[in-house]
Image: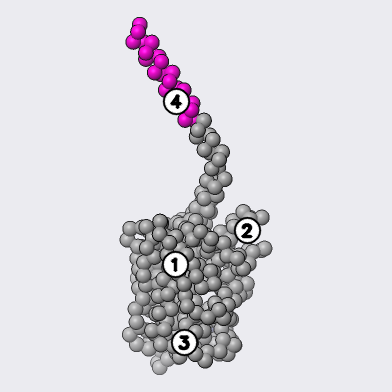
Amino acid sequence: MKLTKIKFNINKSIYRGGEIIFLVFLIFLLISGVSFSTGKSWQDTASKTLGKNKGSIIILDMHSGKILAVVNPRIAFTESFPPGSLFKIITGCALLESQGFNPSGKITCRNYFALGTRKFTCNTPGGHGNVDFIKALAVSCSVYFYSKGQRLDGREILSIASSFGLGKKSGIDYRGESPGVLKKPGNKEQFTLMLAGEGGTCMITPLHAALMVSIIAGRGKFSFRAGKKIHEYKIKVRKKTIALLLEGMRQSVKKGTSKGASVEGLEIAGKTGTSEDERFPGETHAWFAGFAPFDKPEIAVVIFLEDGGHGFEAAGFAKKIFKFYRDKNK
Ligand SMILES: [Zn+2]
């Protein structure tokens, strides 16, 4: 008899304990409900946006410097790819900082640039016509960067790329983070390919792309919260340089190659990239890196589609994330 009674009491107290735990859990849900669901939705939106496509998406919070969402972190942090025209942000920065460069000066793009016996082509049949710096960035005119870039030397470009965090690890708390590749081009041909982000002299992870665009969004600086540590990025360039890069990226979304990312009621800036997958001839990676709102950036977004086509297609993926941001802030 005695034994049964004890057993009954224990059961009753376990039951009461369960009740209390449940109540505490309910209160916790009520208090933390808002922030809990916000965090989850960013990740959900990013996952749904990528869907079954191979690649990665990163969303950074421009205020806290934290990663709001990352899809396929392994690809985002440990694998590096040629950046294609995303690298025009670096080449553009080097051009704008070089002595005597005039951003209003125009070239005529007839869709190819000849160097010796080799022809480097642009992305549109017939060419872009007359192109100045802002238009070159907006429509991603490689001929402009091939020809204007000949005045630069490789070291200036590498030093600017390095100040954007390329070629080194960010220090994020993730095993096997890739530093990417940043090396001196061996000859004029390799140098010309580098100007447009091809040829393997520069390889970046999607995280590098996110840092690069966040630094532009932050008007030259960004504090990246990589786990417990904060990494400060600051590029030493003139205000005018940042202003022109920003304008080129704004025009890219307004009427250039990034147009697919545009969302009504939100001002976005960005840059697309298409780069060859050297492992599979004919296959191309698609990139988009951008941010919003233009004046006071809150989020930076990177879309990377492995063997996923062209940059303008990646911009279309980013549209879904910018739409989510706009609707959340209505
Ligand atoms: Zn062109």
Say whether marks 1 and 3 touch (CB < 8 Å): no
Say whether marks 2 and 3 touch (CB < 8 Å): no
- The residues tagged by marks 4 and 3 sit, at their Cα atoms, a distance apart of 71 Å
- The residues tagged by marks 2 and 3 sit, at their Cα atoms, a distance apart of 37 Å
Residue 167 or residue 70, whichever sits in front: 167
Of discs 4 and 3, which sits in the foreground? 4
**Residue 36: x and y, percent?**
52, 46
Q: Which portion, as a residue range, is magenta?
A: 1-22
**Residue 54: x and y, percent?**
43, 60
Say whether marks 2 and 4 touch (CB < 8 Å): no
Question: What type is the residue that disc 3 sits on?
Answer: Gly
Question: What type is the residue that disc 2 sits on?
Answer: Arg
Of discs 2 and 1, which sits in the foreground? 1
Q: Which mark is residue 17?
A: 4
The question of residue 19 being in magenta is answered with yes
Instruction: Tell me if I can see residue 281 in this picture.
Output: no
User: Which mark sits nearer the N-terminus, 4 or 3?
Assistant: 4
Say whether marks 1 and 4 touch (CB < 8 Å): no
State which quarter of the image contains the C terminus. bottom right
Kindly give the residue lying farthest to the top in the view shown.
1
Please tell me which residue is depicted at 45% across the width and 69% down the height of the picture: 233
Left or right of 158: which side holds 136? right
According to the picture, the residue beneath numbered tag 2 turns out to be 326
Q: Is mark 4 within 8 Å of ligand 1?
A: no
According to the picture, the residue beneath numbered tag 1 turns out to be 232
Question: What type is the residue that disc 1 sits on?
Answer: Glu
> As displayed, is residue 243 above or below residue 20?
below
User: Which mark sits nearer the N-terminus, 2 or 4?
Assistant: 4
According to the picture, the residue beneath numbered tag 3 turns out to be 149
- Crowd tier of the residue under label 1, counting other residues whose Cα lies within 10 Å: few below 14, some 14–19, many 20 or above: some
- Crowd tier of the residue under label 2, counting other residues whose Cα lies within 10 Å: few below 14, some 14–19, many 20 or above: some
Q: Is mark 2 within 8 Å of ligand 1?
A: no
